[in-house]
Amino acid sequence: MTEYAMETKKLTKRFGHVTALENVDLHLTRGTIYGLVGKSGAGKSTLLRVVSGLQSPSEGGYELFGKDSAGEEIRGIRRRAGYVAGGWSMLPGLTLRSNVKRQCALLGVPGTERVGEVLRMTGLQDFADVKAEKLPAEKQVIAAIAMALCGSPDLLLIDDGLSGMSLQQKTETEELLKRFKQDLGMTILVTAQDPESLENVADQYGILEHGELKRELSSEEIKALRETALRVRVSDANALARVMVAKSLRHRILSEDTVEIYDRPHITELVTELAKEGCEVLSIEERSVQTESLLQAISGGER
């Protein structure tokens, strides 16, 4: 039986007449890295804030390590989760060491041993006595992760932590997260605007669009979708679209005579079905899928 570090159940969050999350059923398997992907405004940050206890669900709920969000134990269970939010997480006038020590104290972690552990885990020992406001830009995300590690979390929630990084920064942070997973058995959820930005780190993906979780996929499924698509030029794109819908194949109409297909149809069967519709295949081209097309394909078909 699959064990989940986090599972949402019909999770819904409304702000007045605006629905930020609607009936979200997300399944984060223990010991994996989960990429929650969606455009700006999709509801990613809202989901993390709700699960972290910063906001309450409007309907539905969630479980952390098997404990229901409506239960009395959830406050204690939330201490097993570290939350890395966007924005500044340290007092700028204090050194990194002092910020980490202060965070440990706020979490009730006794002594100073954990401070040294956190700095070693994140490779920030050489920056321990640097004031937060003077930290190099490439170390600021890792410093924010260090703050989230103070309570020895089993679950790490990172909101948009890998965006806008240089290749070196991104690689360093990815290696850090993979080491946490492998060496500590930590479960990690990280949000991003596109699947490609997490391709070197995520084991699972959830695709969030306008507050709805469209699909959950493995890294292998994402890779298969991302690598290639079939661009089919026909005499009647609407006829091809009808066949796509009948066969439940994800696709997008590009023009009156061209359709991009994201699944893998049997070509002979496809040509035969189109002939029945009076539609002629003019060309079939295999091509790389761009991010926009990939997200549309994952979301479940034509838009």
Image (cartoon, rainbow, N blue to C red):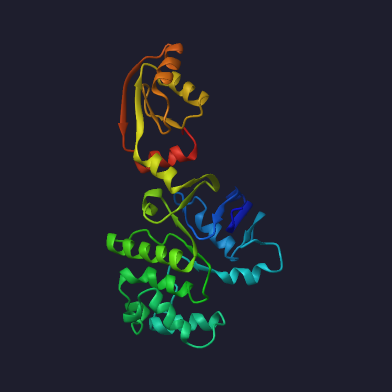
Question: Which of 235 and 6 lies nearest the eye of the viewer?
Answer: 6
Extreme-bottom residue of the structure: 111
Extreme-front residue of the structure: 1
- In the picture provided, is 55 more to the left or to the right than 123? right
Q: Is residue 161 visible?
A: yes
Question: Which of 203 and 297 lies nearest the eye of the viewer?
Answer: 203
Does residue 141 lie above or below 95 as drawn? above
Does residue 109 lie above or below 169 as drawn? below
Q: Residue at x 43, y 85 (%)?
A: 98
Q: x, y percentage for residue 149?
A: 48, 73
The answer to which image quadrant residue 292 occupies is top left
Q: x, y percentage for residue 1?
A: 61, 53
Q: x, y percentage for residue 70?
A: 70, 62
Q: Residue at x 51, y 81 (%)?
A: 104
Does residue 216 lie above or below 276 as drawn? below
Q: x, y percentage for residue 78?
A: 60, 68
The answer to which image quadrant residue 274 occupies is top left
Figure disc tally:
0
Q: Residue at x 28, y 59 (%)?
A: 167
- In the picture provided, is 85 more to the left or to the right than 49? left
Q: Is residue 86 visible?
A: no
